[in-house]
Image: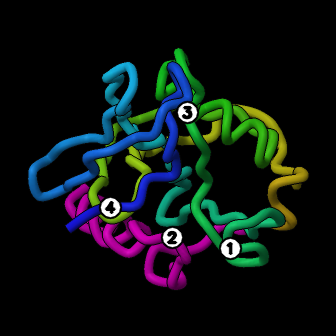
Amino acid sequence: MTQKYNNNFCSNCGGKLIGIDILKASNPTCDKCNFTYYEDPKVAAVIIVKKQNQILLVKRSIEPHFGKWSLLSGYVNRGENVESAAIREVKEEVDIDVSITELQGVYSGLSPVVIIVFHATQTSGILSISNEVSDFKWVKNEDIPKLPFVYDQQIIEDYLLISNRT
């Protein structure tokens, strides 16, 4: 079985990448300079902002999943601390400050994105919309709707298990 890579040419010399075989766990190699290409995953932080028995959801005003309710989330920049990225994303999306209270878990294998999920509480600020979200709402744990991203169902199931223990 072969996997289609987004890059067919060497970023080092421009030669053709060859030898793409997932079953043998090989990565494409340049036929000219022997450079090996690794297609690394992206890392994203998901932040479940909690208040009593409610969580904060946002309505997305960007793709993917434009117009759907979602957890707060965003990509981690190269060289950025994951916790700092989570806090930054909340500030960018709804203009509040949060304090991370715990790491829920890491989710991977279903997409090219590795998801790191944190719980947080609001420490200051007033919720407002941004260019990334058109609305927000607090939702009771028992009323959390179906969310659009591939890991969301498992994230919510795990969150509810943790919430019911405390």
Residue 128, placed above or below residue 146: above
Circles 4 and 1: CB atoms closer than 8 Å? no
Residue 136 seen from this side: no
**Does label 2 or label 1 sit earlier along the sequence?**
1
Quarter of the image for residue 142 reads: bottom left
Residue 51 visible in image? yes
Spatial CA distance of label 1 from label 3 is 19 Å
What stretch of residues is rendered in magenta?
A: 137-166
Relative to 137, 22 lies left or right: left
How far apart are the alpha carbons under marks 4 and 1?
26 Å
Quarter of the rendering containing residue 84 = top right
Task: Count neighbours of disc 3 (C-alpha within 10 A) and say few if under 14, some if 14 to 19, many if 20 or more.
Answer: many
| Label 4 vs label 3, nearer the camera | 4
- Residue 36 or 92: which is nearer the viewer? 36
160 in the magenta segment: yes
In the picture, which quadrant includes the C terminus? bottom left
Instruction: Name the residue tied to disc 3.
Output: 76
Above or below, 146 against 93 in this view is below
Regarding mark 4 in the picture, which secondary structure is present there? loop
| Label 4 environment density (alpha carbons within 10 Å; few <14, some 14–19, many ≥20) | few
Task: Say which residue label 2 marks.
Answer: 149
Q: Which mark is residue 65?
A: 1
Is label 2 in a helix, a strand or a loop?
loop
Check disc 3 and report its element: helix, strand or loop: loop
Q: Position of residue 65 (x, y in %)?
A: 68, 73
| Separation (CA) of disc 4 from disc 3 | 26 Å
Which residue was labeled with disc 4? 3
> Where residue 164 sits in the image (x, y, percent)?
26, 66
15 left or right, relative to 110: right
Q: Position of residue 57 (x, y in %)?
A: 64, 65
The local secondary structure at tag 1 comes to loop
Labelled pair 4, 2 in contact (Cβ < 8 Å): no
